[in-house]
Amino acid sequence: MTSTTPEPSDEPAPYSGAYGEQPFPVRPKTNTLAIVSLVSAFFVSLAAVITGHIALGQIKRRGEGGRGLAIAGLILGYAGMLATIVAVVLLIVFAAALGTFLNTAMHDGSIGGSTSEATSAPQPDGAPGALPTGTIGAADFEAGYLSVGSGTDVVDVYFDPMCPYCQQFETANGDQLAALVSDGSITLRLHSLTFLDRASLGTEYSSRASAALTCQATLNPDATLDYLAALFANQPGENTEGLSDDQLVALAGTGSSIAGCVGSGDYQAWSQANTELALNGPIPDAEITQIQGTPTALVNGSVYSGGLTDPAEFLAFLRANAVS
Protein backbone atom coordinates (compact mmCIF):
# COMPACT_ATOMS: atom_id res chain seq x y z
CA MET A 1 0.00 0.00 0.00
CA THR A 2 1.28 3.38 -0.96
CA SER A 3 1.08 6.20 1.70
CA THR A 4 -0.25 9.53 0.61
CA THR A 5 1.56 12.63 1.81
CA PRO A 6 -0.51 15.85 1.97
CA GLU A 7 0.50 18.40 -0.53
CA PRO A 8 1.92 21.61 0.89
CA SER A 9 -0.62 24.40 1.05
CA ASP A 10 -0.21 28.16 1.27
CA GLU A 11 -3.43 28.48 3.30
CA PRO A 12 -2.69 29.45 6.93
CA ALA A 13 -3.71 27.16 9.81
CA PRO A 14 -6.87 28.03 11.77
CA TYR A 15 -6.41 30.63 14.48
CA SER A 16 -3.03 31.61 13.19
CA GLY A 17 -1.87 35.14 13.09
CA ALA A 18 -2.51 35.29 9.39
CA TYR A 19 -6.25 35.33 10.02
CA GLY A 20 -5.83 38.26 12.43
CA GLU A 21 -7.07 36.16 15.40
CA GLN A 22 -5.49 35.57 18.81
CA PRO A 23 -5.37 32.09 20.34
CA PHE A 24 -7.13 33.44 23.55
CA PRO A 25 -9.77 36.19 24.15
CA VAL A 26 -8.34 39.66 24.95
CA ARG A 27 -8.98 40.71 28.58
CA PRO A 28 -10.68 44.11 28.96
CA LYS A 29 -8.61 47.02 30.21
CA THR A 30 -8.76 47.63 33.97
CA ASN A 31 -10.29 50.99 34.83
CA THR A 32 -7.65 53.31 36.29
CA LEU A 33 -9.98 55.01 38.78
CA ALA A 34 -10.98 51.63 40.19
CA ILE A 35 -7.35 51.07 41.14
CA VAL A 36 -7.12 54.60 42.52
CA SER A 37 -10.25 54.02 44.62
CA LEU A 38 -8.88 50.87 46.23
CA VAL A 39 -5.50 52.42 46.97
CA SER A 40 -7.06 55.66 48.30
CA ALA A 41 -9.22 53.69 50.74
CA PHE A 42 -6.15 53.10 52.90
CA PHE A 43 -5.27 56.80 53.05
CA VAL A 44 -8.16 59.13 52.19
CA SER A 45 -11.60 57.57 52.60
CA LEU A 46 -13.48 60.38 50.89
CA ALA A 47 -11.27 60.15 47.79
CA ALA A 48 -11.88 56.38 47.68
CA VAL A 49 -15.65 56.90 47.71
CA ILE A 50 -15.60 59.58 45.02
CA THR A 51 -13.28 57.74 42.64
CA GLY A 52 -15.08 54.45 43.30
CA HIS A 53 -18.42 55.84 42.13
CA ILE A 54 -16.86 57.47 39.07
CA ALA A 55 -15.06 54.22 38.24
CA LEU A 56 -18.29 52.18 38.35
CA GLY A 57 -19.89 54.63 35.93
CA GLN A 58 -16.97 54.43 33.51
CA ILE A 59 -16.82 50.63 33.71
CA LYS A 60 -20.50 50.37 32.83
CA ARG A 61 -20.17 52.70 29.83
CA ARG A 62 -16.83 51.46 28.48
CA GLY A 63 -17.00 47.78 29.35
CA GLU A 64 -13.75 48.04 31.25
CA GLY A 65 -12.61 45.74 34.03
CA GLY A 66 -11.99 46.56 37.69
CA ARG A 67 -15.54 46.54 39.01
CA GLY A 68 -14.48 44.44 42.00
CA LEU A 69 -11.66 46.87 42.76
CA ALA A 70 -14.05 49.83 42.65
CA ILE A 71 -16.56 48.10 44.93
CA ALA A 72 -13.81 47.15 47.39
CA GLY A 73 -12.62 50.76 47.38
CA LEU A 74 -16.14 51.99 48.07
CA ILE A 75 -16.67 49.57 50.95
CA LEU A 76 -13.36 50.43 52.57
CA GLY A 77 -13.92 54.15 51.93
CA TYR A 78 -17.34 54.23 53.55
CA ALA A 79 -16.05 52.13 56.46
CA GLY A 80 -13.20 54.59 56.95
CA MET A 81 -15.55 57.57 56.89
CA LEU A 82 -17.84 55.91 59.45
CA ALA A 83 -14.88 55.14 61.70
CA THR A 84 -13.74 58.77 61.46
CA ILE A 85 -17.19 60.08 62.41
CA VAL A 86 -17.39 57.73 65.41
CA ALA A 87 -13.90 58.77 66.52
CA VAL A 88 -14.77 62.46 66.29
CA VAL A 89 -17.98 61.99 68.30
CA LEU A 90 -16.14 60.05 70.98
CA LEU A 91 -13.44 62.72 71.10
CA ILE A 92 -16.05 65.46 71.57
CA VAL A 93 -17.78 63.49 74.36
CA PHE A 94 -14.45 62.81 76.06
CA ALA A 95 -13.41 66.46 75.81
CA ALA A 96 -16.73 67.61 77.29
CA ALA A 97 -16.45 65.12 80.16
CA LEU A 98 -12.86 66.10 80.83
CA GLY A 99 -13.82 69.79 80.84
CA THR A 100 -16.57 69.16 83.39
CA PHE A 101 -14.19 67.09 85.53
CA LEU A 102 -11.50 69.78 85.53
CA ASN A 103 -14.01 72.56 86.16
CA THR A 104 -15.40 70.74 89.18
CA ALA A 105 -11.98 69.94 90.59
CA MET A 106 -10.75 73.50 90.05
CA HIS A 107 -13.69 75.17 91.74
CA ASP A 108 -14.07 73.13 94.88
CA GLY A 109 -11.61 70.25 94.80
CA SER A 110 -14.41 67.71 94.96
CA ILE A 111 -16.17 65.40 92.53
CA GLY A 112 -19.38 63.50 93.04
CA GLY A 113 -22.90 63.90 94.33
CA SER A 114 -24.63 65.94 96.91
CA THR A 115 -22.25 65.07 99.74
CA SER A 116 -19.12 66.81 98.42
CA GLU A 117 -16.94 68.35 101.06
CA ALA A 118 -16.72 72.10 101.57
CA THR A 119 -13.54 73.86 100.50
CA SER A 120 -12.94 75.94 103.62
CA ALA A 121 -12.07 74.74 107.07
CA PRO A 122 -12.62 76.53 110.37
CA GLN A 123 -9.86 78.88 111.46
CA PRO A 124 -8.90 79.65 115.04
CA ASP A 125 -10.23 82.84 116.61
CA GLY A 126 -7.85 85.76 116.27
CA ALA A 127 -6.36 84.49 113.00
CA PRO A 128 -6.89 86.45 109.79
CA GLY A 129 -10.34 85.61 108.50
CA ALA A 130 -11.28 83.97 111.80
CA LEU A 131 -14.82 82.63 112.05
CA PRO A 132 -17.35 84.63 114.08
CA THR A 133 -18.28 83.54 117.57
CA GLY A 134 -21.14 84.13 119.97
CA THR A 135 -24.76 84.82 119.04
CA ILE A 136 -25.99 87.71 116.91
CA GLY A 137 -29.68 87.91 116.16
CA ALA A 138 -30.81 84.46 115.00
CA ALA A 139 -27.26 83.27 114.25
CA ASP A 140 -25.60 80.98 116.76
CA PHE A 141 -22.09 81.03 115.36
CA GLU A 142 -20.52 78.59 117.77
CA ALA A 143 -23.30 76.01 117.36
CA GLY A 144 -23.19 76.46 113.57
CA TYR A 145 -26.83 77.23 112.67
CA LEU A 146 -29.53 79.89 112.50
CA SER A 147 -32.21 79.43 115.12
CA VAL A 148 -35.76 80.77 115.20
CA GLY A 149 -38.49 80.01 117.69
CA SER A 150 -38.35 78.82 121.28
CA GLY A 151 -40.39 75.63 121.35
CA THR A 152 -39.35 72.52 123.22
CA ASP A 153 -39.31 70.34 120.12
CA VAL A 154 -36.29 70.97 117.91
CA VAL A 155 -36.44 70.67 114.14
CA ASP A 156 -33.15 70.79 112.23
CA VAL A 157 -33.23 71.31 108.47
CA TYR A 158 -30.07 70.89 106.38
CA PHE A 159 -30.30 72.37 102.88
CA ASP A 160 -28.34 74.00 100.08
CA PRO A 161 -29.81 77.17 98.51
CA MET A 162 -29.21 75.74 95.01
CA CYS A 163 -30.61 72.25 95.75
CA PRO A 164 -33.89 71.71 93.80
CA TYR A 165 -35.11 69.03 96.21
CA CYS A 166 -34.60 71.46 99.07
CA GLN A 167 -36.83 73.89 97.23
CA GLN A 168 -39.53 71.20 97.03
CA PHE A 169 -39.29 70.61 100.78
CA GLU A 170 -39.47 74.34 101.53
CA THR A 171 -42.44 74.86 99.20
CA ALA A 172 -44.35 72.02 100.88
CA ASN A 173 -43.37 72.60 104.51
CA GLY A 174 -42.08 76.18 104.84
CA ASP A 175 -45.38 77.80 105.84
CA GLN A 176 -46.19 74.94 108.20
CA LEU A 177 -42.84 75.23 109.96
CA ALA A 178 -43.16 79.01 110.17
CA ALA A 179 -46.57 78.62 111.83
CA LEU A 180 -45.18 76.14 114.36
CA VAL A 181 -42.38 78.60 115.14
CA SER A 182 -44.90 81.41 115.60
CA ASP A 183 -47.13 79.50 117.99
CA GLY A 184 -44.18 78.39 120.11
CA SER A 185 -44.41 74.69 119.22
CA ILE A 186 -40.90 74.24 117.84
CA THR A 187 -37.42 75.67 117.64
CA LEU A 188 -36.34 75.60 114.02
CA ARG A 189 -32.60 75.37 113.36
CA LEU A 190 -31.46 76.12 109.83
CA HIS A 191 -28.22 74.67 108.44
CA SER A 192 -27.46 76.32 105.10
CA LEU A 193 -24.79 74.27 103.29
CA THR A 194 -22.52 75.16 100.39
CA PHE A 195 -21.47 71.98 98.59
CA LEU A 196 -23.24 73.05 95.38
CA ASP A 197 -20.74 75.88 94.91
CA ARG A 198 -19.35 73.53 92.26
CA ALA A 199 -22.58 73.90 90.27
CA SER A 200 -22.52 77.71 89.96
CA LEU A 201 -19.82 78.21 87.30
CA GLY A 202 -17.25 79.59 89.71
CA THR A 203 -19.43 82.22 91.47
CA GLU A 204 -19.79 80.14 94.69
CA TYR A 205 -23.50 80.86 94.72
CA SER A 206 -24.33 78.49 97.58
CA SER A 207 -21.77 80.17 99.83
CA ARG A 208 -22.96 83.65 98.86
CA ALA A 209 -26.62 82.80 99.35
CA SER A 210 -25.94 81.09 102.69
CA ALA A 211 -23.94 84.12 103.82
CA ALA A 212 -26.75 86.47 102.69
CA LEU A 213 -29.25 84.43 104.72
CA THR A 214 -26.93 84.76 107.72
CA CYS A 215 -26.67 88.50 107.14
CA GLN A 216 -30.44 88.72 107.28
CA ALA A 217 -30.56 86.55 110.39
CA THR A 218 -28.14 88.84 112.21
CA LEU A 219 -29.58 92.17 111.06
CA ASN A 220 -33.29 91.31 110.71
CA PRO A 221 -33.78 88.10 112.70
CA ASP A 222 -37.59 88.25 112.62
CA ALA A 223 -37.44 88.12 108.81
CA THR A 224 -35.13 85.09 108.62
CA LEU A 225 -37.81 82.66 107.43
CA ASP A 226 -39.22 85.20 104.98
CA TYR A 227 -35.77 85.56 103.42
CA LEU A 228 -35.36 81.78 103.28
CA ALA A 229 -38.68 81.49 101.44
CA ALA A 230 -37.59 84.23 99.03
CA LEU A 231 -34.31 82.43 98.31
CA PHE A 232 -36.16 79.29 97.28
CA ALA A 233 -38.88 81.16 95.41
CA ASN A 234 -36.12 82.74 93.29
CA GLN A 235 -33.84 79.72 93.20
CA PRO A 236 -31.52 79.61 90.16
CA GLY A 237 -30.91 76.39 88.28
CA GLU A 238 -27.84 74.26 88.84
CA ASN A 239 -24.89 74.97 86.54
CA THR A 240 -25.75 78.67 86.30
CA GLU A 241 -24.04 81.62 87.95
CA GLY A 242 -26.97 82.05 90.33
CA LEU A 243 -28.26 85.36 91.65
CA SER A 244 -25.91 88.32 91.85
CA ASP A 245 -25.07 89.96 95.18
CA ASP A 246 -27.38 92.85 94.29
CA GLN A 247 -30.22 90.42 93.66
CA LEU A 248 -29.56 88.68 96.96
CA VAL A 249 -29.71 92.03 98.72
CA ALA A 250 -32.97 92.94 97.00
CA LEU A 251 -34.64 89.78 98.35
CA ALA A 252 -34.28 91.13 101.88
CA GLY A 253 -36.91 93.82 101.33
CA THR A 254 -37.40 96.38 104.11
CA GLY A 255 -35.50 96.56 107.38
CA SER A 256 -31.83 97.06 108.00
CA SER A 257 -29.88 96.84 104.76
CA ILE A 258 -27.78 93.71 104.31
CA ALA A 259 -25.89 95.24 101.36
CA GLY A 260 -22.69 95.94 103.29
CA CYS A 261 -22.71 92.51 104.90
CA VAL A 262 -23.28 90.71 101.60
CA GLY A 263 -20.76 92.84 99.72
CA SER A 264 -17.99 92.19 102.24
CA GLY A 265 -18.46 88.42 102.03
CA ASP A 266 -19.10 88.11 105.75
CA TYR A 267 -20.14 84.62 106.85
CA GLN A 268 -19.13 82.80 103.66
CA ALA A 269 -16.24 81.04 105.38
CA TRP A 270 -18.50 80.27 108.35
CA SER A 271 -21.08 78.69 106.03
CA GLN A 272 -18.38 76.60 104.36
CA ALA A 273 -17.03 75.47 107.72
CA ASN A 274 -20.52 74.43 108.82
CA THR A 275 -20.81 72.39 105.63
CA GLU A 276 -17.60 70.54 106.37
CA LEU A 277 -18.79 69.74 109.87
CA ALA A 278 -22.19 68.56 108.63
CA LEU A 279 -20.70 66.29 105.97
CA ASN A 280 -17.97 64.84 108.19
CA GLY A 281 -19.73 64.87 111.55
CA PRO A 282 -20.29 64.36 114.31
CA ILE A 283 -23.83 65.71 114.57
CA PRO A 284 -24.68 66.10 118.26
CA ASP A 285 -27.83 64.54 119.71
CA ALA A 286 -28.86 62.88 116.45
CA GLU A 287 -29.33 59.31 115.28
CA ILE A 288 -26.96 59.95 112.37
CA THR A 289 -23.31 60.97 112.56
CA GLN A 290 -23.16 62.99 109.33
CA ILE A 291 -25.34 64.38 106.57
CA GLN A 292 -25.55 62.18 103.48
CA GLY A 293 -27.47 64.61 101.28
CA THR A 294 -29.97 67.46 101.23
CA PRO A 295 -32.57 68.15 102.28
CA THR A 296 -32.21 66.36 105.60
CA ALA A 297 -34.74 67.09 108.34
CA LEU A 298 -34.48 65.90 111.93
CA VAL A 299 -37.06 66.13 114.71
CA ASN A 300 -35.41 65.90 118.11
CA GLY A 301 -32.55 64.01 116.43
CA SER A 302 -34.73 61.54 114.47
CA VAL A 303 -34.31 61.61 110.70
CA TYR A 304 -37.37 62.18 108.54
CA SER A 305 -37.40 59.75 105.59
CA GLY A 306 -40.87 60.45 104.19
CA GLY A 307 -42.00 62.37 101.13
CA LEU A 308 -40.48 65.78 100.54
CA THR A 309 -43.70 67.25 99.19
CA ASP A 310 -46.19 65.81 101.69
CA PRO A 311 -46.68 68.30 104.55
CA ALA A 312 -49.22 66.05 106.29
CA GLU A 313 -46.72 63.20 106.43
CA PHE A 314 -44.01 65.47 107.81
CA LEU A 315 -46.37 66.92 110.43
CA ALA A 316 -47.34 63.40 111.51
CA PHE A 317 -43.65 62.51 111.86
CA LEU A 318 -43.04 65.67 113.90
CA ARG A 319 -45.85 64.86 116.28
CA ALA A 320 -44.80 61.23 116.58
CA ASN A 321 -41.30 62.32 117.66
CA ALA A 322 -42.33 65.29 119.82
CA VAL A 323 -41.20 65.39 123.41
CA SER A 324 -43.58 68.10 124.57
Image (cartoon, rainbow, N blue to C red):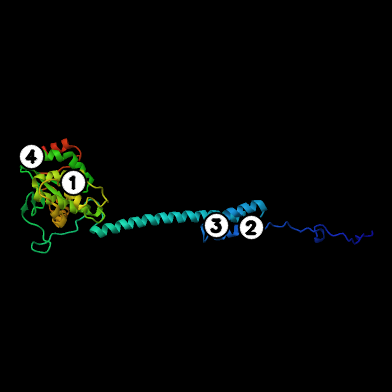
The span from disc 2 to disc 4 (Cα, nearest Å) is: 93 Å
Dot 2 or dot 4: first in sequence order is 2
- For disc 3, the marked residue is 48
Identify the mark at residue 31; answer none if there is no mark.
2
Dot 2 or dot 3: first in sequence order is 2
The span from disc 1 to disc 3 (Cα, nearest Å) is: 61 Å
Q: Secondary structure at mark 2?
A: loop
- For disc 4, the marked residue is 182
- 294 horizontally vs 44: left or right: left
40 above or below 239?
below
Q: Secondary structure at mark 4?
A: helix
Q: Secondary structure at mark 3?
A: helix
Percent of width and height locating residue 212: 15, 51
CB-based contact (under 8 Å), mark 2 and mark 3: no
- For disc 1, the marked residue is 231
The span from disc 3 to disc 4 (Cα, nearest Å) is: 80 Å
Q: What amino acid is at disc 3? A: Ala
Dot 1 or dot 3: first in sequence order is 3
Percent of width and height locating residue 272: 16, 55
CB-based contact (under 8 Å), mark 2 and mark 4: no
The span from disc 2 to disc 1 (Cα, nearest Å) is: 75 Å
CB-based contact (under 8 Å), mark 3 and mark 4: no
Position of the N terminus, as image quadrant, is bottom right
For discs 1 and 3, the disc positioned in front in the rendered view: 1
Dot 3 or dot 4: first in sequence order is 3
Dot 2 or dot 1: first in sequence order is 2
For discs 1 and 4, the disc positioned in front in the rendered view: 1
For discs 2 and 1, the disc positioned in front in the rendered view: 1
Q: Nearer the viewer, residue 81 or 251?
A: 251
Q: What amino acid is at disc 2? A: Asn
305 above or below 291?
above
